[in-house]
Amino acid sequence: MTHARFAILSFLLLVPLFSRARTLEVCASCAYPTIQQALDASQDGDQIVVKAGTYLQPTLYIAKAITLSGENYPILEAPKGQEILVIDADGVTVEGLQLQNLTPNYLKDLAAIRVRRKGFFRILNNRLINTFFAIYLEYARDGEVSGNTITGTAVNELSSGNGIHGWYGEYVCIENNTIKGHRDGIYLEFMHFCSVSGNHSEANVRYGLHFMFSNDDHYSRNTFRKNGAGVAVMFGKRIGMTDNLFDYNWGRSAYGLLLKEIYDGKIERNRFVQNTIGIHIEGASRVEYHQNTFQRNGWAVKIAGGCLDNDFAGNTFLSNAMDFVLNGRVNSNTFNGNYWSEYTGYDLDRDGLGDVPHRPVKLFSYIVTRTPESIILLRSLFIDLMNFSEKVSPVFTPADILDHKPLMHPLQ
Amino acid sequence: MFKILRYSFSDLMRSRWTYFYFGFFLLFTLGLLFLSSDVGKVIISLMNVILILVPLIATMFGIMFYYNSREFTELLLAQPLSRTQLFIGQYLGLALSLSASLLLGVGLPFLVYGIFMSAEIWNFAVLLLNGILLSFIFSGMAFWIALRHENRIKGFGLAIMMWLFFAVIYDGIFLLGLMWFSDYPLEYVSLGVSLLNPIDLSRILILLKLDISALMGYTGAVFEKFLGTGLGISLSFLSLGFWILLPTANIRRVALKKDF
């Protein structure tokens, strides 16, 4: 019995050696002048190499487990109103292509590369230029999207698509892509157990990265710069956010990170630099904010109602116009052991913790949440005097928003 | 008039206090630039100082200058000189020497640090321009107050009150008003109210230049839209100009009637 099993196993392992994985070349003077002809002639496991050139054809459906790769970035385009590539089989690899010029369509979400109800796909090192939706993952699982450069020409939200769009799926890994000029750089809806890391998302009209109804995802080491807003995480559970840089998301309604209806998240070691609002929190519970750095933001952290059991510890607040705004009461959120550049207390026993509690909410930020027009008095001498006297003897600001153990020096 | 102007200008230029003023700005700016190489940040720190100290020092200088040079003024009044020329000349000499100290004290360190290479040159220019306008406004107001009051204590007190009003009390009343009427749309009202105070107006002009405007939300949008247009810019400079003209006209009016 064991021998028979071994024989079958070794046969299975040796099959790839005997089967002929062929390489099919596509170019004007090759055996296959069009990609479609090569696709028709291919079998599972084959590799199709497309040489440099421009290829215009109707939508290509890849229905076999093949590798479609480009040499020196051949250009693929589709006629008006059609998509360029549809991955319609498990185990497809697409790499080194340049896909470009999809016309926006308001009835269909046209995409340059669409994965439809399939898994084990790899979309590597492609260039996608001026595509409405660049990569569209529809019920996709166990895939990898990495090293792609995605450049759009989005002007407003209505007439633009997302860079990488995920709609239902699991275990997709999105790595080291560069996405510019789309509606959302990366949009994930109903996508679970995904990892988004090392991406650079810049100048997108809406969000750099957008989660909706997605659970157990993790994003780290990404850069979100100059987007309408950096990252929006809405209606999700157990999402990890670590080591990201939220940079210069600046504008009237911009923020680095928006949290809405989030449970059990972890936000660690991120840097928020020059955002209008560093983190805007609405209805987030049991989220840990540890060792993040907030530098030169308008509002570092703005907490609206419905937030319970959030823990802020080990964060560094450096020269923000306002460190903390809290609408309403403390509600069992804790703010202990952070470094505040505005802290003026002392440390007599030299244990690195200030001996006097710090009040992160200034009277002025309290007034501004009530009367938004009073922001016009920002940096006026009267406001400074008022904040100072309130700090000495708090009357109006909630007395229980305190950091009992403020750090004397930022954590390294 | 130019002789008087030149005289009071060179008189003040020799004064210990002018050097002190110049030296203060020089050291302060150098210190800030030394501590932080980010020119944008230095401009923000300087803004606070310029908005508070420039009016205060201009007020004190204006009052002191008039009371100190009173004997000499009486001597000049005996000469065949028109009073308008005499007093306006003195005032302009005063304001110009203050502006020169500010310009050199803040400008030289930035020049050394290469402001002309920096992208912040326009923010810096707006800051300096506002500083100079504030010098003119507050020295003029102080000069007017001094001319009105023979009693030095009263003159000093009033001038300090005037500075305190524009620098602090005005904003307090403004804030109270905003909170009191917070149920109403207040963007345009607050725009109008801040046009009336030269310190507030300068602060907002600088803040809008410094890109902090994004913090100001909808109110800031209204301000930026207004102050970004030709109408807004001309109105705000008209307002600052009015604040220079008001004391100047009053100095002339009081000087013409006054019995020395």
Image (spheres, coloured by chain):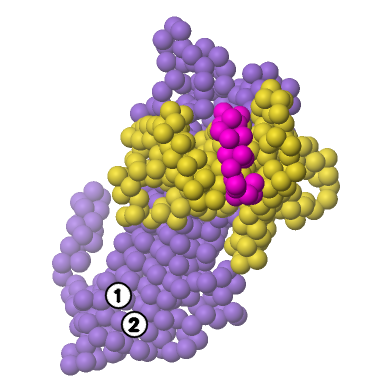
- Would residue B107 be visible to someone looking at this image? yes
Left/right of residue B151 with respect to residue A84 in the rendered view: right
Q: Position of residue B2 (x, y in %)?
A: 50, 51
SS at badge 1: loop
Q: How far separated are the C-alphas under marks 1 and 2?
A: 7 Å
- Would residue A381 be visible to someone looking at this image? no
Q: What residue type is labelled 1?
A: Leu
Residue at image mark 1: A97
Q: Position of residue A125 (x, y in %)?
A: 29, 66
Residue furthest to the left in view is A17
Q: Quadrant of residue B139?
A: top right
Where's the C terminus of chain A, which quadrant?
top left
Q: What stretch is highlighted in magenta?
A: B65-86
Whether residue B66 appears in magenta in the rendering, the answer is yes
If you read the primary sequence from the N terminus, does the residue marked by circle 1 or circle 2 appear first?
A: 2
Q: What residue type is labelled 2?
A: Leu
Name the foreground residue: A94 vs B103.
B103
Q: Which residue is drawn at 32% across and 76% down?
A: A98
Asked if the residues shown at circle 1 and circle 2 are in contact, with their CB atoms under 8 angstroms apart, the answer is yes
* Tag shown at residue A76: 2
Q: Which chain carries label 1?
A: A
Q: The chain shown in purple is which? A: A
